[in-house]
């Protein structure tokens, strides 16, 4: 197992290197020039100097190596220094955004809490709803609960989040006026009234994401439970006189959770990038909104860093899912 | 004697039933899939025949009728007024300020363009993008899958590439591709064609991976079967072997991928248009209409509903068709 984890991590690091390289080269090929929007009256040599100051003078390979070193070495070292006070960073050059001229990672750290709160809570709520629905749907297959449950999950899975989001805004903020349609990130939770406000503004985005994720996970949970319910060990458990509760919740559920847990792990990164849309609908200024504004402003270091962060998440959770599968299911041995 | 004739008749009857007839019989038992197929065909016919049935042009500007409400907003009036509003909507304006016309059943936008015509036009674009991108993804996926499954030498390389593509953050990457190539393509092919080419290519090359994996798995299993060995022993060349013996046997997963691919492509197209990075503003697609309408969400909520409903119904029906096809093409379920 340890051998497998080491080999698998090695492959992950290689994949990560390759993906960052591909994204970097794609962006370096970009015909869009960050100095293109400057006034035409600026002389050519000044423009060249501006390009030089943005770090665009070198050839793309040198820039890539420098960016890679900055992202994977200098930035973690800076974070360690901020957290522990040890002297690990030595004032090296960090990645600077074209837009704001401040370090990219500082802005990213500012945006992470909003994204994590909304997206993370949406995923958590979705998972918590999906598991019992999947279990009951499978246990009572073809009952009215199952029919309605599978229909709702099909709808939740098919209807895009930008439509459910807008629909919820029309119903609950335009017509009923219960919840605000815009997420206010400047709100500081310091009193009960503000806490209620915070909860209110989180209800809509969280429920949109929760519906979408619950739909996907409950389909998996139902299928996985159905696979296990007809197995011989379930008959054995019933034959030796165990109650239905113990059979379903302990024996069947534990075995059905194995593929579902990996699906949940694999879903985390797609939720992050999928939340770009939800953040846009509810005007949450999280990571997704940061990416959109960076793309519109031709802010290449920001776009590069954010895309690679999404790639890191995908690769990391793929690795976690693979390892989890091996840990949870003793029949699977990677050798 | 009688027994024998009956069996012969049986054989004759069963021989006339082809495999696809069986698939259709199984597909018909799936209620959701049948409803889905019906709704999908209805949408497709509505979009294709729409311009003949509803002759208003999607770009015609009727500035006097701008910001008209949909005819359904008559139902928000008092009970007594609903009948009058439906019978003679123009007279409502003087009394209640409600601006509705039978000439624009879904209302008009802020420039006075007819929403129904725009939804029809947008549907043509969205479906065209969906189908073309699906075909491209299917072609690439099948090619990679068959090559990787059939030729052992290519397997490692192709499958590592597939893994690599699967690890790419797709939505951010699509956005980046739009930022990079939109201007170049727009200047070469015009804004509409440029966006279409970019959209189809971008969606196609980022969604072939699941098909490739499934096809490879099936090809690996089929390659070891006796009929392939038999075909090889009489000297069939590799290309003939793939075209005549392997491909027809992997049609089922390819067809299921095709239906799911349409749904995926339509959602991706609308998502990109919704983020403002798809087609140019005056060129309607369902996602673009939805995006443009969110600015008028408070005053004209119905403008958001129609394109959104169109996207959702299409994707939902396609997903149901996919579910039914998967059951129908699975020989373990078929005939039960």
Image: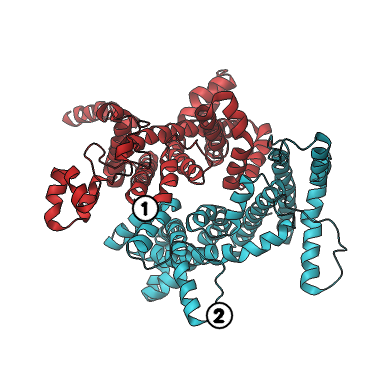
Chain colours: A cyan, B red
Helix, strand or loop under label 1: helix
Residue marked by disc 2: A190
The tag on residue A303 is none
Compared across the picture, whether A73 is left or right of B240 comes to right
Q: Can residue B114 be seen in this view?
A: no
**Is label 1 in contact with label 2 (beta carbons under 8 Å)?**
no
Which of the image's four quarters has the N terminus of chain A?
A: bottom right
> Can you tell which of label 1 and label 2 is closer to the viewer?
2
Task: Give the image location of residue B291, x and y in percent.
Answer: 45, 46
Residue A136 quadrant? bottom left
The residue lying toward the viewer, choosing from B141 and B215, is B141
Instruction: Give the chain letter at badge 2.
Output: A
User: Residue, x 75% and y 47% (percent of image)?
Assistant: A17
User: From the viewer's perspective, is residue B282 above or below residue B78?
Assistant: above
CA gap between label 1 and label 2 equals 39 Å
User: From the viewer's perspective, is residue B267 above or below residue B76?
Assistant: above
Q: Residues within 10 Å of mark 2 (few under 14, many from 20)?
A: few
Helix, strand or loop under label 2: loop
Task: Give the image location of residue B158, x and y in percent.
Answer: 65, 36
Instruction: Give the chain letter at badge 1.
Output: A
User: Residue, x 74% and y 57% (percent of image)?
Assistant: A102
Residue marked by disc 1: A155
Which of the image's four quarters has the C terminus of chain A?
A: bottom right
The residue lying toward the viewer, choosing from A163 and A274, is A163
User: Residue, x 56% and y 74% (percent of image)?
Assistant: A188
Compared across the picture, whether B164 is left or right of B324 comes to right
Mark 1 vs 2, N-terminal side: 1
């Amino acid at each position: 197992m340890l051998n497998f984890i080491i080999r698998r991590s090695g492959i992950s690091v290689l994949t990560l290197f390759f993906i960052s390289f591909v994204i970097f080269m794609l962006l370096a090929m970009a015909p869009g020039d960050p100095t293109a929007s400057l006034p035409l009256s600026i002389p050519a040599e000044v423009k060249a100097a501006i390009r030089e100051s943005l770090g665009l003078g070198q050839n793309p390979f040198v820039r890539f190596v420098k960016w890679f070193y900055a992202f994977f070495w200098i930035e973690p070292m800076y974070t360690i220094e901020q957290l522990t006070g040890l002297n690990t960073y030595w004032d090296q050059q960090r990645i600077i955004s074209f837009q704001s001229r401040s370090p990219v990672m500082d802005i990213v750290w500012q945006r992470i809490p909003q994204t994590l709160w909304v997206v993370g809570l949406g995923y958590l709520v979705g998972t918590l709803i999906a598991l019992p629905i999947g279990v009951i749907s499978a246990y009572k297959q073809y009952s009215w609960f199952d029919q309605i449950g599978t229909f709702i999950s099909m709808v939740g899975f098919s209807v895009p989040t930008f439509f459910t989001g807008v629909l919820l805004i029309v119903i609950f903020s335009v017509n009923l006026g219960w919840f605000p349609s815009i997420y206010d990130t400047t709100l500081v939770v310091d009193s009960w009234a503000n806490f209620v406000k915070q909860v209110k503004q989180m209800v809509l985005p969280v429920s949109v994401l929760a519906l979408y994720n619950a739909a996907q996970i409950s389909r998996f949970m139902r299928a996985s439970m159905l696979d296990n319910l007809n197995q011989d060990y379930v008959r054995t458990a019933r034959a030796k006189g165990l109650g239905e509760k113990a059979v379903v919740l302990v024996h069947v559920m534990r075995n059905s959770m194995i593929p579902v847990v990996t699906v949940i792990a694999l879903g985390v990164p797609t939720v992050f990038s999928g939340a770009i849309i939800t953040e846009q609908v509810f005007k949450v200024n999280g990571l997704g909104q940061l990416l959109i504004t960076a793309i519109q402003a031709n802010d290449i270091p920001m776009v590069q860093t954010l895309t690679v962060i999404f790639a890191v998440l995908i690769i990391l959770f793929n690795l976690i899912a693979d390892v989890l599968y091996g840990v949870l299911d003793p029949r699977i041995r990677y050798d | 004697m009688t027994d024998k004739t009956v069996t012969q008749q049986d054989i004759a009857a069963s021989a006339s039933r082809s495999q696809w007839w069986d698939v259709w019989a199984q597909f018909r038992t799936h209620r959701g899939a049948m409803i889905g197929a019906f709704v999908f065909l209805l949408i497709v016919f509505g979009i294709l025949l729409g311009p003949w049935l509803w002759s208003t042009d999607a770009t015609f500007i009727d500035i006097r009728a701008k910001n008209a409400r949909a005819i359904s907003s008559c139902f928000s009036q008092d009970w007594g007024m609903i009948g009058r509003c439906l019978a003679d909507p123009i007279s409502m304006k003087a009394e209640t300020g409600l601006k509705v016309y039978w000439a624009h059943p879904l209302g008009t936008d802020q420039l006075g363009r007819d929403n129904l015509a725009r939804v029809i036009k947008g549907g043509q674009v969205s479906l065209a993008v969906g189908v073309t991108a699906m075909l491209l993804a299917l072609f690439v996926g099948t090619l990679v899958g068959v090559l990787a499954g059939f030729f052992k030498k290519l397997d490692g390389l192709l499958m590592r590439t597939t893994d690599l593509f699967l690890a790419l953050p797709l939505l951010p990457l699509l956005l980046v591709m739009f930022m990079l190539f939109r201007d170049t393509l727009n200047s070469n092919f015009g804004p509409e064609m440029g966006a279409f080419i970019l959209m189809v290519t971008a969606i196609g090359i980022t969604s072939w991976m699941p098909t490739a994996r499934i096809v490879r798995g099936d090809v690996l299993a089929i390659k070891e079967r006796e009929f392939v060995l038999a075909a090889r022993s009489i000297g069939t060349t590799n290309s003939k072997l793939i075209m005549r013996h392997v491909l027809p046997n992997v049609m089922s997963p390819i067809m299921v991928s095709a239906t799911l691919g349409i749904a995926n492509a339509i959602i991706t197209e609308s998502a990109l248009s919704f983020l403002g990075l798809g087609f140019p503003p005056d060129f309607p697609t369902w996602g673009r209409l939805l995006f443009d309408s969110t600015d008028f969400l408070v005053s004209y909520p119905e403008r958001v509903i129609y394109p959104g409903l169109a996207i959702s119904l299409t994707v939902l029906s396609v997903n149901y068709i996919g579910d039914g096809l998967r059951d129908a093409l699975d020989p373990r379920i078929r005939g039960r």
